[in-house]
Amino acid sequence: MTAVRTSEDTGLPRKAGRNILAAVGAGVCGLLLAVAAGSPAYAGVYATNDITAGHIDIVNIECPSTPTLALTTKIGSGTPVNPVDMHNYAFVYDDVSTAVTWVSTTGTAGYWKIDIGSATQSSAPWVGFSFEGSCPGSGAVWMSAAGANPGDVRLFNSAGSQVLGTSSGTYPLGSGAHTHFEWRFYAASKATTPQIYNLYFGFSASAPLSTQNWLAAKFVIVP
């Protein structure tokens, strides 16, 4: 069973969906920000750069020189972001978007589900993992909670199976792989105020990493 895979980075679309008010160039990556109609202007609310839509490879493995690997984050078609700079970015999901759905479970508990399809990127961050194919190698991605969070975060593939969670397992990632997921952000109840999930991502492989082998990332759900 495999998750959705793409052959190349498609970048951010310039034509947004009906919920999109504007697209604005921002950040060192020259990325485009999409702001949902009726929602606050996110830029600078949660971080220096609040990413509200587009193609994101949160774990992006590059090969600056064989056999060295580099862990970065790829935002749209821009220059990859070094892990040490990720504190300047927040990935923001507004449940006005058709890509974001609250799913009830037991009682009032549930989770926000982010669609796995590529159409998600027009109205919400479409987040996955990528390892460019210019050098051989493989490793494992891990994800864990950073401090207090509203609940667990879990990743599912297109077959509906969980492949990674903040408290379970690792995800294999080899040269040439490019994978996107359905994301589920769990909470004790559906909140009426923004919920911030602070996560760590790391990549472990036999080849040395040219930068730190983990990064901190912030995901925000706006009810």
Image (spheres, rainbow, N blue to C red):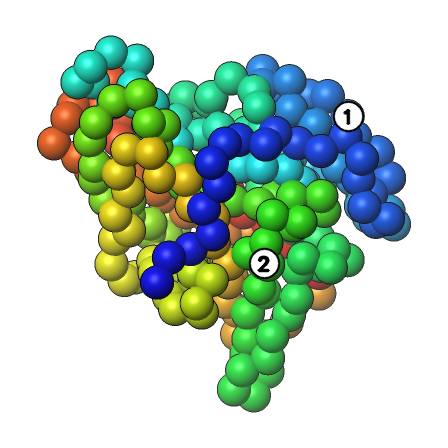
Residue that lies at the very extreme toward the left in this rendered image: 206
x and y, in percent, of residue 27 in the image: 62, 19
Give how far across and how far down residue 28 sits, in percent. Answer: 58, 15
Q: Is residue 171 left or right of residue 44?
A: left
Looking at the picture, how far across and down is residue 144, in whole percent?
A: 33, 51
Residue that badge 2 annotates: 114
Give residue 51's quadrant in the image: top right
Q: Where is residue 204 in the image (x, y as percent from the top left)?
A: 20, 38
Q: Which amino acid does label 1 sit on?
A: Val
Image point (67%, 40%), residue name = 53
Identify the image quadrant of the C terminus: bottom right
As shown in the figure, which amino acid type bears the numbered disc 2? Answer: Ile
Of labels 1 and 2, earlier in sequence is 1
* Along the line of sight, the residue nearer the viewer: 106 or 117: 117
Residue 103 vs 179, above or below: the answer is: below
**Does dot 2 land on a helix, a strand or a loop?**
strand
Residue drawn where x is 64% and y is 70% of the image = 102
Element type at mark 1: strand
Asked if residue 195 shows in the view, the reply is: no
Residue at x 65%, y 50% (from the top left corner): 120
Residue 209 seen by the camera: yes
The label number, if any, that marks residue 9 in the structure image: none
Front residue (pair 203, 180): 180
Mark pair 1, 2: CA separation? 23 Å
Q: Residue at x 47, y 36 (%)?
A: 7
In the rendered image, the residue lying farthest to the top is 65
Task: Please give the residue where the numbered disc 1 appears in the rendered image.
Answer: 24
